Image: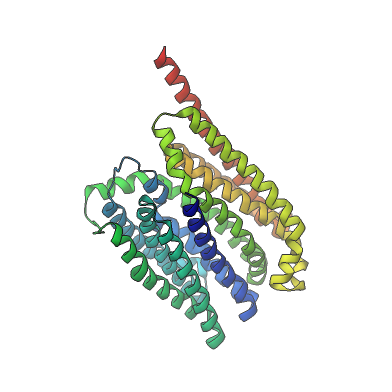
Amino acid sequence: MKKNVIWNTFGSIFYSACQWLITILVVHLVSYAAAGSLSLAMTTSSSFSAISLFSMRNYQVSDIKGEYSSNIYVGSRIITCLLALICCFFCSFFIGGEISESICINGFMLIRVAEAMVDVLHGIDQKYMKFNFIGISYILRGLATVITFCVVLKLVQNLELAILLIAITNLLLALLYDWRMTNSLEKIKPVLVDSKIWSLLKACFPIVVFAFLLSLENLMAKKALQMQYGKDLLGIYSSIASPTLVVQVFASVAFNPFLPGLIKEYMDGDIQRFHRQLNRVIGLLVIMSVVVTIGAMLLGRWGLTLLFGKSILDYYEFFIPIVWVTILTAWVWIIYAIVVGMRLIKELLIGIIIDFALCAGLVWPVLKFFGVNGTSLVQIIVLSIYTVYLIWICKKRIKFVKTTNLQKSK
């Protein structure tokens, strides 16, 4: 388990760090305006990535009883990737505004498709505890991303071309490495027409709505910032935000290998132990939040100066609120994974619909009153509320199961 955690954590963080690195490099190689376009492409494609992923990974790894085969999972992922590409293509012209931004959005969506196909294969790798396959995959795609990005921008200064070539290299690696390695564990023959595919998609649909609306909250806040203050300030805000994402990634990937065991305790009816483990996760998240906040306060100015130069300190006031947004996002994604494992899907959906409506109603008034920091503040408000809600529904279900078991024993 220790080796698995190390492979999964290092690989995931390395890949995320490489994606973060290109958000830093674009400032030095091109401009803050280009950083704004890249950020918009990454955030927009992330929203449609919710469709391609269909939030199936947590459902897949917590499928302890083998309700669906690997071929069904892979086949359904091909269908959702095609659907996501089509949706993103049509929406990009509205969201992007300019043709160049639309190209960036669609190019990055191809990268998301590669990630989605790799993700379902990694779910199979995880079943066989082959986290070394997962770690190496992340490392290869991370290196390919940074090298391709730097070479293209250095030679032709064309952001659209750089993104498109990154997409091609990621898709090739997904085919040449990930598919081949997973196929060595289990012969994959994707099923595209089967009643079980629609059954699986139906089961996961509320989860994908959750992921889509959660991503849309972040996109809505950034788009409002761009419309109110312009692309340059969006680029500065996004550049300051980029180093903080490693916290969210680290928290999520460090937890991921433990999810199947945690959910198995719940499915086996060991509610007391499951409850203790849930409280332990919450306690660790509290400690992580305090440590990250203190670290950001102590090292934030130094780190931002090192990455972007002293001029970025004129906008340092954005940093700590952005850190809190990242911490709360990590909370939501980790507790959400437990909620999905407990199959509290209806409650998850109801909560995110209300939360999204609250975000939509608050974003413009908060941005207008608090300025640029309103972009972070509105997310802090809605993410805090949703985090408390997720913990509450977990505790409520645990109490219900305990009461039911007690009544049965009598």
How many discs appear?
A: 0
Measuring 72% from the left and 56% from the top, which residue is drawn there? 296
Tell me, what colour scheme is on the image? rainbow
- Depicted 318 relative to depicted 197: above or below: below
> Which residue is the extreme one toward the top?
410
> Which residue is the extreme one toward the bottom?
155
- Depicted 405 relative to depicted 178: above or below: above
Q: Position of residue 303 (x, y in %)?
A: 72, 65
Measuring 45% from the left and 72% from the top, which residue is drawn there? 107
- Depicted 268 relative to depicted 44: above or below: above
- Quarter-wise, where is residue 304 in the image? bottom right
Q: Position of residue 228 (x, y in %)?
A: 66, 64
Measuring 53% from the left and 46% from the top, which residue is drawn there? 334
Q: Position of residue 32 (x, y in %)?
A: 65, 74
Is residue 240 something that shows in the picture?
Answer: yes
In the image, taking residue 233 as reference, residue 125 lies left or right, namely left
- Of 82 and 367, which appears nearest the observer? 82
Query: Looking at the rendering, in which quadrant would you find the C terminus?
Result: top left
- Of 360 and 103, which appears nearest the observer? 103
Is residue 360 something that shows in the picture?
Answer: no
In the image, taking residue 237 as reference, residue 356 lies left or right, namely left
Q: Position of residue 64 (x, y in %)?
A: 35, 41
